[in-house]
Amino acid sequence: MKNNLDFKMDIPLLILRVGIGIMFALHGYPKFMGGIDKWTGLGYYGMGSIGIDIFPAFWGFMAAFSEFVGGIMIIAGLYLRYFSFLLFITMSVATATHLSSGDGIMGASHAIESAVVFLCLLFAGPGKYSLQNRWNK
C-alpha cells in the first residue's frame, strides 16, 4: 500500500514542481538579467508598497533571484524548502503591491495563488523524484 501512496504523492509533486518551476524561471529570467537598474526599480516598486524604501537594488535582486534561480531549483527539487520560502515571501510582497496599488483581489490573484502553491511546497517537500532525494541516499 505504501508504494501506491508514494506514487499518488510523488508524481503530482513532480508535475507541480516542474510546471511552476518552469513558469517562474521564465518569468524571473528577464528580471534577473535586467541588472542593477531593473533590480532597483523592482525593489522600489515592491518593497515601497510595504513601506520599506532602503536597499531597493538588493530587494529587487532578491525577487529576481527567487523567481529565476528558485524556479530552476524547484524544478530540480534542490533546496526546495528554502526556495519555496523565498518565493512565498516574494509572492506575499507581490500581493501587497497589487493590493496597495488598487488592483484589487483579482489583480493580486496570481500572486496569491502562487504564494499558496509555494507554502504547500514548503510543507510537502520535493518528493521522491528530486535531486535532493537522490543526493540524500
Image: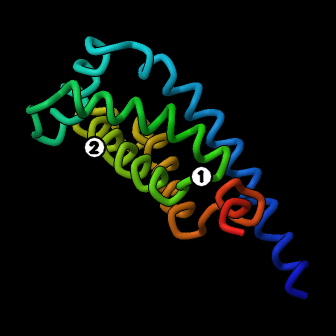
The residue mark sitting in front, 1 or 2, is 1
* Label 2 secondary element: helix
The kind of residue on which mark 1 rests is Leu
Q: Quadrant of the N terminus?
A: bottom right
The residues bearing labels 1 and 2 have C-alpha atoms spaced at a distance of 28 Å
Whether label 1 touches label 2, CB < 8 Å: no
Q: Quadrant of residue 58?
A: top left
At which x and y percent is residue 136? Answer: 66, 67
* Label 1 secondary element: loop
First in sequence: mark 1 or mark 2?
1
What residue is at 67 percent from the left and 46 percent from the top? 76
Query: In the displayed structure, does residue 104 sit left or right of residue 100?
Result: right
At which x and y percent is residue 45? Answer: 23, 26
Mark on residue 78?
Answer: 1
Front-most of residues 9 and 76: 76
What residue is at 66 percent from the left and 44 percent from the top? 75
Residue under label 2: 96
Numbered marks: total:
2
Front-most of residues 59 and 134: 134
48 above or below 70? above
110 above or below 77? above
92 above or below 9? above
